[in-house]
Amino acid sequence: MAGTTRTPTNLTQGAKADAGIGASTLRPDGTLKVTGEFAYSSDMWHEDMLWGFTLRSPHAHARILSVDTSDALAQAGVYAVLTHDDLPTEHKKYGLEFTDTPVLADGVVRHHGEPVALVAADHPETARRAAAKIKVEYEELPVVHDEASALAEDAPLLHPGRDDHHAHEVPHPNIVHRQPIIRGDANAAARRADVIVTGEYEVGMQDQAFLGPESGLAVPGEDGGVDLYVATQWLHSDLRQIAPVLGLPEEKVRMTLSGVGGAFGGREDLSMQIHACLLALRTGKPVKIVYNRFESFFGHVHRHPAKLWYEHGATRDGKLTHMKCRIVLDGGAYASASPAVVGNASSLSVGPYVIEDVEIEAVALYTNNPPCGAMRGFGAVQACFAYEAQMDKVAAELGMDPVEFRQLNAMTQGTIMPTGQVVDSPAPVAELLRRVKALPLPPENQWESAGQTADVRALPGGLSNTTHGEGVVRGVGYAVGIKNVGFSEGFDDYSTARVRLEVVAGEPVATVHTAMAEVGQGGVTVHAQIARTELGVQQVTIHPADTQVGSAGSTSASRQTYMTGGAVKNTCEAVRDKALQLGRRRFGTFHPAWATAELLLEGGKVVTDGGEVLADLADVLGDDVVDLELEFRHRPTEAFDIVTGQGFGHVQYSFAAHRAVVEVDTELGLVKVVELACAQDVGKALNPLSVVGQIQGGTTQGLGLAVMEEIIVDPKSKVRNPSFTDYLIPTILDTPTIPVDVLELADDHAPYGLRGIGEAPTLSSTPAVVSAIRAATGLALKRVPVRPEHITGV
Amino acid sequence: MDGTSEVGLRINGKPFSRVIDNRTTLLDLLREQAGVTGPKKGCDHGQCGACTVLLDGDRRVNACLLLAVSLDGADVTTVEGLADGDRLHPVQQAFVDHDGFQCGFCTPGQICSAVAAIAEARAGWPSVVTPPDTPPGPVEPTAAEIRERMSGNLCRCGAYVNIVAAVREVAR
């Protein structure tokens, strides 16, 4: 085989730029990404490596009667075939929150596509064909596929004998977790209502559909350990789950982040990590596993599909009186992040509004459907679709403008959440709505004024030339949402950063080493900016992310700039203090300001807060190296009470509002999103270019959920559309212009006053688009994605 | 007739010849045999465009949909072959400057596709959205033209707004 060994992309050449925080610095990995040199996990290559393949269950629920691997093993080129019986230790399960997911099926398969056996061979095609020769005899079992079948008296239990920390609280063993929230007296408050509006809503199963499929390379080490190069969101969480299954101490499982082709929550759970390591340790050879697109749809968890029942009351003058809701999330066969998704869905179910009397219940079910877990927006997306539909409905019932109605009930700083938590930083909900509404609208009905030269391509159906404007109606819709930032409910959420400051070739250089997964969000850009700002250096080197440094937590929950950015800031400050101590020791006698003034590092020099230069940083450091590794924590949170749902559960909140303009061909049910404007409060934009990119990306994924994206699961719990032909994500043609208005109101609890931004724009995008379709068509539209048949009624 | 053939082509200007299984796609030949991993395998079914490369100059193709044996003598340019030494191709530079990507996985395909799309428009090739009364000659690179011509390349991070801006800057 030709070609050189591919190792994780080395970002250590340093990004030279002047820009600190607040500047739109370009990505340090940008050049590598546009030249094809950036090594993604699927690009890893090693001399003499084998290819792994996973045999998966064709059934959603079945007993495995027998497995015969002899024909597969007999095939030339096959090095190993592993089943559950070959697992090396008594630890045969893993999981993010509960350890409930078998590494390989343990006599029962609980969902379509569950891993049953592994093959390692010298060619991927050989591995695939060998896997096809494994004879598995199944006895199909009845499937649990919705709430009724999960909670039926004779329902098969997905996990009998549960011993997880929610097992003793749940009303039924097929309920992963249940979180009620009771505040005030919703029934009493309902008596004050002049109007009561109820609604039942449904959200389909969305897929992260990251373009770089699950992949990685495991290389057995001489010490009996293993080196794993992989695309993930959280190296140390992977490590914690991998090591026990392999029977290795964590220090013998050395993980390095390789290039990550998108994540969006779908890489928070393990996929091929343990499998590749098992095959590598069994064969003594490096093993690479790369899922294809079909397999990728089975290889990671999805967004929980949900059914939501809501009741709102309001007085004639437009004040919300109360809210009751019940949210049922389908968690699928294994828990994954379901408990935390329930926590979010329940605690954020009111939305960014002031409602003092609420009665809330959210549950996640165990079913035989595909496992669901983290996806951008995490429980808040489902709730936002429903409560925003309700806001439109209540406003219509009162004859009020839907934006004014929202503004009248909008939360502000000081509002008490349904959990009893006081919102103690800016919550500019009404202002975001005002801003997004104030943006100029795209030109009206251009097909009417344009006459013969009507621009067909701008109409629904566009290039298919399905209409020249007849049957097309325009609608405008608004929505606003609230998302928590960081890990909640008492989780010990921390990040670690190691920062080294030294002189290289006469110039001070900072090296930032964290385990943060750069998945495209631009964390590495921001880390370099922070180091420049805090240490006054130009040259910053970003060390590859690995497990040789402490955990950075997950690249999820909109938390990385806050948390690992905060860790980099924190460590840089400590490094700066050490450097200044060195300076005082070396030069303190030469100038009184060393002892008396507030000292800063700027432009490679030690300066006083008055701007006087005391010394070159390079001279201060000399041959000394300052090298520190420190942890950073956000303020502690606490669990929600299991009966009342009360508790200081969230670290920070994040808000975005959208205005959608759509045109709908009512005869064919085709929707064209003409424009999707967003206003978001980001606290402080550390990198405005990246901030706008995140907002546009989240907005686009919300558009996808609104009108096209859904994994179809049939009544036998089988996935019907695992391909990009049948699971559609927005193309460049589907994505409209996305004007973005960024508001910066500092949160004093957060580093630089910043707010986590990645998820909020994914929330309100979906309901805004659907609100606009409702406005255009007059239809109720209670489920997403909205399909043509929902509009035409055929 | 053992199911193999010798194929010789140029990859980014360098000759490459090999006896290959006739079923090998151009994408697998590039990635697994020639060590050219810029083109990405996002779907292997011609749905995502991450494997887009240029054939014989600036004809863009999905490398996953072509059998390498059909390309004997062809000249293949991947994203690795666009820069002039350390100087990025203008499209590459524009993607960096406009932040036309986040994770970057689709970017090699986006960039090859954009290079060819710009060349096609300049050569006066109409697209399906080019108005029929457009006079012969270079096609104006409007946002609608760019969206249409780039619609075979998925970007899940949703960097489309910036991709349009990047391509437009170079196309002008």
Image (cartoon, coloured by chain):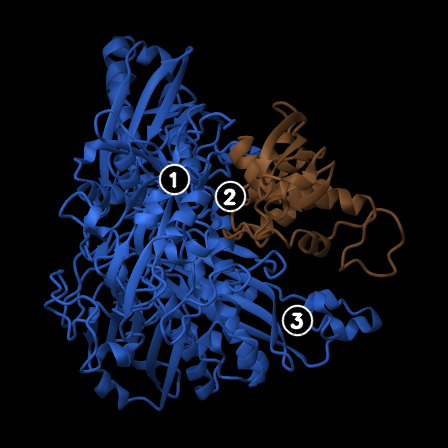
Q: How crowded is mark 1: few (under 14 residues within 10 Å), some or many (20 or more)?
A: many
Disc 1 vs disc 3: Cβ atoms closer than 8 Å? no
Tell which chain the image draws in blue: A
What is the spatial separation of the Cα atoms under label 2 and label 3, in whole angstroms?
A: 30 Å
Which residue bears the numbered disc 2? Answer: B105
Under circle 1, the secondary element is strand
> What shade does chain B have?
brown
Q: In which quarter of the image is residue A642?
A: bottom left
Residue depth check, mark 1 versus mark 2: number of the one nearer the observer: 1
Q: Which of marks 2 and 3 is in front?
A: 2
Residue A110 percent location from the top left of the image: 27, 65
Q: Name the residue under label 3.
A: A460
Say which amino acid is labelled 3: Pro
Q: Residue at x 28, y 74 (%)?
A: A144
* Chain at tag 1: A
Label 3: element kind? loop
Q: Are discs 1 and 2 located on one and the same chain?
A: no
Q: Which of B109 and A327 is in front in this view?
A: B109
Query: What residue type is disc 2 on?
Result: Phe
Q: Mark 1 points at which residue?
A: A121
**Residue A27 placed where, x, y %?**
49, 36
